[in-house]
Image (cartoon, grey):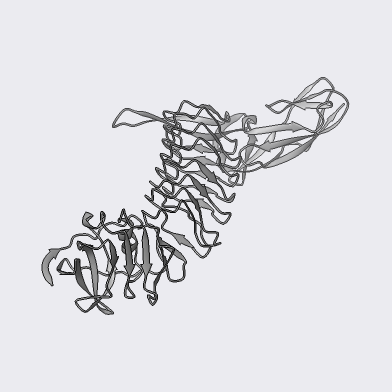
Amino acid sequence: MKKTIITWGLVSALALSTVTSPVVSTVSFAEEAVELEENGFHYIVNEGASGRTACIHYYDGPEEKLSVPDTLGGIPVTEIRFNGIQNRDKITEINLPKSMVATEPLYTSLSYLKHLSTITVADDNPELTAKDGVLFTKDFSVLAVYPVAKTDASYTEPDTVKMSYGFSSNRYLKEVTFSSNEKYTVPGLCGFSSIEKAIIPPNVTKIDESAFESCANLKEIQWGGNETRIGLNAFYNCGSLTDVTLPESVTELSAYAFFSCKGLKSIKLPSGLTSIGGHAFAYATSLEKITIPDSVLKIGYSAFSHCKAKIKKAPYLKKIAHKFVETGDVSYTYSAKAKVTKKGKTKNYAAGNITGIKANKKTVNVKKGKNTALKTVVFINKKKKGTLDSSILSYSSDNKSVAKVTKKGVVRGLKKGTVKIRIKLRTTGESYQVKVRVK
């Protein structure tokens, strides 16, 4: 057995630190530790509440199919924190002992092994198990490691999985069906993989930050239909996406969501979308056109920078320039503004603060061949503020032969009779009706 004095700095940052496993053990390292070596395993000994345990920090022995021992120097092996490239070009299979505990550093360490295709676990391990070469927590609630070199072309997460550490960097996997567990809400960590098709079940409510970042081969997304949020960088640099239709449930599109998706030619945004984050479609150089739904209240910085698409948007989305003092560069955002008139004075309000609308008059009379303008009373943060500008409203008549209505809310009587005019707030869909009598 060899001994070496080593100095520990900060523990390596976990790539998956934002995800918390239901079963996680932690150990504090001393600033100085004695490195021991046995049969190619380099490890240190930790002192904890449960006694002395061994943590492997690299292996330089000859084995490609590696069985991790239960003990080193007579001390139980509970952790692996590989921190050297000497591990990555050799190990193809690994068997974890009874003593190994479920920790995020273990998951990260095994994900570093670029030729690892199979993981097995001792049957009597109380915290970990494996199925078809994939590492799970014992109750199968956490998919801990999908080996980078596992060669299957498709994979379906078990419906017991509530949390997944994903399929990052796997170069063989082409299709993934995510867990249908009702408590599973965040598919993610598939970045830099070769996934071509992602099947998202109805239980999923958001696509997490960087979920599919740099999945260069991703061509098809089968949505579950209940996603409300597309997270930061979710499809960043997914160059093989060409046509995308977001589910109607989506209300928020975060910054950089489709940044540098250079193959993206068209995207259909949902009618209830309220915000588009900064740089969301920047450098999507093949995007030909995009229609912004009337529900959108805000578009962030340079959302369409270096994107040649023709952008069709509501007139109440006002362009706002922002100049950066340090560089002199100018960036643009858009914000929905509502013009409200009271006692002859007009004031702009954020459209998102409109909490209600109603008719100024429930019944309006107009003579045949004459015009009359409809007025809408608006409430801002539940307080009556005046009448609302027509640009944020839409109008429709249920009998255009009796009376028609313009985009600006002007009714023209065509023949005697009664019609109903519906006035709708374009941003939220709230509406009311006015009875119009033509005399």
Numbered circles on residues, count? 0
Asked if 49 appears above or below 199 in the picture, the reply is: below
User: Which residue occupies the foreground of this view, 138 or 119?
Assistant: 119
- Relative placement, left or right, of 239 versus 384 is left
In this view of the protein, which residue sits in the foreground, 101 or 394? 101
The image shows residue 240, relative to residue 104, as above or below, that is: above
- Quarter holding the C terminus? top right
Q: Quadrant of residue 330?
A: top left
Image coordinates of residue 366 in percent, x first then y, are 82, 26
Which of 176 and 65 lies nearest the eye of the viewer?
65
Q: Position of residue 91 (x, y in %)?
A: 28, 59
Q: Could you tell me residue 261's position as x and y percent?
A: 44, 36
The image quadrant that residue 232 belongs to is: top left
Q: Nearer the viewer, residue 148 or 433?
A: 148
Q: Residue at x 38, y 51 (%)?
A: 168
Q: Position of residue 317 (x, y in %)?
A: 54, 32
Task: Give the residue displayed 27% in from the left and 61% down from the top.
Answer: 64
- Image quadrant containing the N terminus: bottom left
